[in-house]
Image: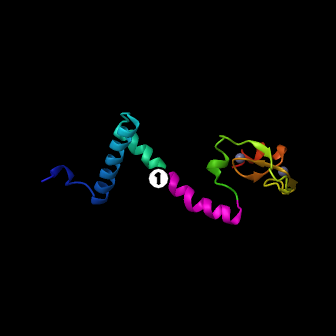
C-alpha cells in the first residue's frame, strides 16, 4: 500500500518520479545538493525551451525567415562581423545590400541597422 500517492493524477506521478530520479542523478553527477523544487523549475524551463526551439528553428532555417524574438532580443553574444564569404546580401532591416552579419542571428545587417534590429519588438 502506498497511500501517499492516492490523491495524485497518474500522469503527475509518472512525471514526478521521472524528475525525482533525474534530480538524484543530477546531484550525484554534479556533486551538488540542488533543492528538488529548484531542479523542477530548471527542468520545466528546459522543457519549454526545447519545445520552443526545435520545430520553429528548423522551419525558420528552411524558409530563411527571422530567428525567434527571444534570441534576437536577448542581448547576449550578438556581434556584427563581416560575412566570411563577403557576399552581398539583403539587410534584414532596410532590405538594401550589406556584407555585414550578426554572428549569433546569422542575419545580414548594416552597422547602422544592427542596433535597431536587436531592439525591435
Ligand atoms: Zn540595413
Ligand atoms: Zn543578433
Residue beneath label 1, please? 47
Residue at 62%, 49% in the rendered image: 70
Residue at 67%, 55% in the rendered image: 67
Farthest residue, direction top: 32
Q: Seen in the image, is 20 located left or right of residue 57?
A: left
**What secondary structure predominates along the stretch shown in magenta?**
helix
Vertical placement of residue 78 versus 6, above or below: above
Quarter occupied by residue 74? top right
Q: Residues within 10 Å of mark 1 (few under 14, many from 20)?
A: few
Q: Secondary structure at mark 1?
A: helix
Quarter occupied by residue 52? bottom right
> Split into 4 quadrants, where in the image is the N terminus?
bottom left
Residue at 61%, 59% in the rendered image: 57
The total of numbered circles placed on residues is 1
Judging from the image, the colouring scheme is rainbow
Farthest residue, direction left: 1
Q: Position of residue 113 (x, y in %)?
A: 81, 46
Residues drawn in magenta: 48-65
Q: Is mark 1 within 8 Å of ligand 2?
A: no
Q: Position of residue 84 (x, y in %)?
A: 80, 50
Q: Position of residue 16 (x, y in %)?
A: 32, 51
Q: Seen in the image, is 16 located left or right of residue 87?
A: left
Residue at 75%, 47% in the rendered image: 102
Vertical placement of residue 32 versus 117, above or below: above
- Reply yes or no: does residue 13 show up in magenta: no
Quarter occupied by residue 36? top left
Q: Position of residue 82 (x, y in %)?
A: 82, 46
Q: Seen in the image, is 98 located left or right of residue 1?
A: right
Amino acid at each position: 500500500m502506498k497511500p501517499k500517492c492516492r490523491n495524485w493524477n497518474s500522469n503527475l506521478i509518472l512525471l514526478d518520479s521521472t524528475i525525482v530520479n533525474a534530480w538524484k542523478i543530477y546531484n550525484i553527477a554534479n556533486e551538488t545538493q540542488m533543492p528538488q523544487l529548484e531542479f523542477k523549475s530548471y527542468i520545466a524551463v528546459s522543457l519549454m525551451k526545447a519545445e520552443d526551439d526545435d520545430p520553429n528553428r528548423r522551419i525558420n532555417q528552411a524558409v530563411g525567415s527571422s530567428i525567434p524574438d527571444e534570441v534576437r532580443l536577448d542581448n547576449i553574444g550578438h556581434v556584427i562581423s563581416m560575412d566570411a564569404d563577403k557576399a552581398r546580401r539583403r539587410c534584414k532591416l532596410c532590405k538594401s545590400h550589406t556584407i555585414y552579419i550578426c554572428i549569433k542571428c546569422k542575419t545580414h545587417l548594416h552597422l547602422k541597422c544592427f542596433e535597431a534590429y536587436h531592439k525591435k519588438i
